[in-house]
Image (cartoon, helix red, strand yellow):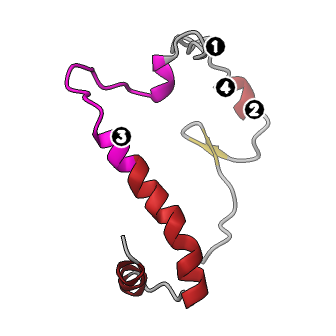
Amino acid sequence: MKLNDFQRIAHLSSLDLSQAEAEAVLPQLQAVFALVEEMQAVDTSGLAPLAHPILFLRDLAQPLRSDAVTEVDHRAENMQSAPAEQNGYFLVPRVIE
């Protein structure tokens, strides 16, 4: 990517960059594009996609707990202190007209 291309993209993105800022950011953007090209060169055709990248490192990944109900329903006891309730929900005064 050349400086002119970068300035054109900045203009299309409504970014107001000075010449010095554009020259300072250009090498960083070129490094990002180089990394993307390097990643695209890797053959991933035989790999299954992961739900999350950390799952690849199973030793480091924290196991997720099972999604099971561990508490009993205390709604009736909790609603006893409510000044007003309807259908098991707290009623509060309207604050927005």
Q: Residue 40: say if magenta.
A: yes
Residue named by callout 2:
80
What whole-number distance in Å separates the C-alpha atoms at marks 3 and 4? 56 Å
Mark earlier in primary sequence (2, 1): 1
Q: Which residue is mark 4?
A: 76
Which quadrant of the structure image shows residue 9?
A: bottom left
Q: Which residue is mark 3?
A: 39
**Residue 19 quadrant:** bottom right
Nearer to us of marks 4 and 1 is 1
Q: Nearer the viewer, residue 90 or 15?
A: 15
Is residue 85 rendered to the left or right of residue 10? right
Residue under the image location 30 percent in, 33 percent down: 42
Report the span colored magenta.
Answer: 36-56
Residue 84 is situated, as x and y percent measured from the top left of the image, at: 70, 47
CB atoms of marks 3 and 2 within 8 Å: no
* Residue kind at label 4, given as amino acid type: Ala
Along the polypeptide, which appears first: circle 3 or circle 4? 3
Estimate the spatial distance between the alpha carbons at disc 2 and disc 1, rounded to whole Å. 17 Å
**In this view, 97 is above or below 14:** above
Q: Quadrant of the C terminus?
A: bottom right
For label 1, the SS is loop
Name the residue rendered at 66%, 25% in the picture.
76
Horizontally, residue 72 falls left or right of residue 57, namely right
Residue contact between numbered discs 2 and 4, judged by CB atoms under 8 Å? yes
- C-alpha distance separating marks 2 and 4: 7 Å
Give residue 72's mark.
1
Seen at 57% across and 12% down, the residue is 63
Q: Mark 2 touching mark 1, by CB under 8 A? A: no
Q: Is residue 30 magenta?
A: no
Q: Amino acid at mark 2?
A: Gln
| N-terminal-most mark, 3 or 2 | 3
Amino acid of disc 3? Met
